[in-house]
Amino acid sequence: MGQGSYSASLELARDLFLCGHGEKTVLKLKSTLTLILLLAGTSALGAQEAAQTFFETNCAACHTIGAGRLIGPDLHGVNERQSREWLVKFMVDPTAVLASGDSYAQELLAASNNVPMPKLPGVDTKMANALLDYIASKSGTILEPAPVEEEIPFTAEEMNRGMDLFLGTESFLKGTPACISCHNVSNVGGFFGGGSLGPDLTTVYSRLGESRGLSAWLSSPASETMKPIFKDAQMSDSEIRALVAFFSVNGKDGVEPATQKASFFYTGVAAAAAILLLFGFLWRGRFRATRIPMVEASKR
């Protein structure tokens, strides 16, 4: 409520009550209205702060408000690009909207290198509306074009350090787990490669918007698996840059993601057979059956 409407409300209340009530009653009413408005303002401020915190923690890795595209679109003015009803529906369950074949959702997906927006825990109708209100409050000013940052080429040293961080041969400063424990990159990690809990990262550089988009994602991963791990183990700027440099080698060369090789299965079978043969050799003098040899001997 603006200052003008607030003053008008107080004046109207004063005129009405002065007709049949004393000045003390008017003062009480004025105090009550003031308290109600203060409480309403405090509640609105708290909701906006909660939305801002949620946005910075869960959304800023893929979106900006007026600073240009990252993995997803710039959200400046998003309330004018689609209806509030559609936006809330998409934010609450983007997977369902995409699966429905919605044309606008498909356009967003194509513009984001076919990287779908995940369903985020904690985004219900109330939070979605609060986030849209927060975005609207940041979209009210006319923004000047963002300055184009000159991209500094990666060095061979940064690329090598990125590989060491990925493989775990160099530890992260805050104890972040090595990437290879959950992810794989083609031609990296020896015969067995990396883990399969997370997605293959061979083409992650191009998939997530190259240096700018990938750096933003690594600074605050929003996936359900990575978020709790990185909550207290954020990577430093230099570590992020080194990883981006490492991923850029495969990303720019267009190397296809690795696939699970049949040799991995056959190696496991051969190893199991070798272990069984070894056990048989080590226990070759073990106690064997007596009844069957005795029966066979009695038949002779």
Image (tube, rainbow, N blue to C red):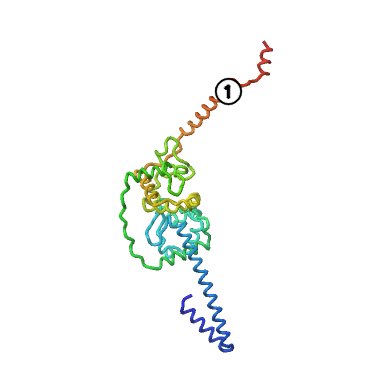
Taking the spot 37% from the left edge, 60% from the top edge, the residue there is 67
Could you tell me which secondary element the residue under label 1 belongs to?
loop
Q: Position of residue 294 (x, y in %)?
A: 68, 15
Q: Which residue is mark 1?
A: 283
Q: Position of residue 91 (x, y in %)?
A: 49, 58
Q: Residue furthest top?
A: 300
**Looking at the image, which is closer to me, 269 or 103?**
269
Taking the spot 47% from the left edge, 43% from the top edge, the residue there is 182
Q: Position of residue 227 (x, y in %)?
A: 48, 52
Taking the spot 41% from the left edge, 64% from the top edge, the residue there is 77
Kind of residue sitting beneath label 1? Trp
Rendered image quadrant of residue 160: top left
Q: How many marks?
A: 1
Q: Where is 110 relative to 292, above or below?
A: below
Task: Please identify the quadrant where the C terminus is shown.
Answer: top right
Q: Where is 136 relative to 8, above or below?
A: above
Q: Where is 283 relative to 75, above or below?
A: above
Q: Residue furthest front?
A: 173
Q: Position of residue 175 (x, y in %)?
A: 46, 47
Mark 1 Cα within 10 Å, few/some/many (few <14, many 20+)?
Answer: few
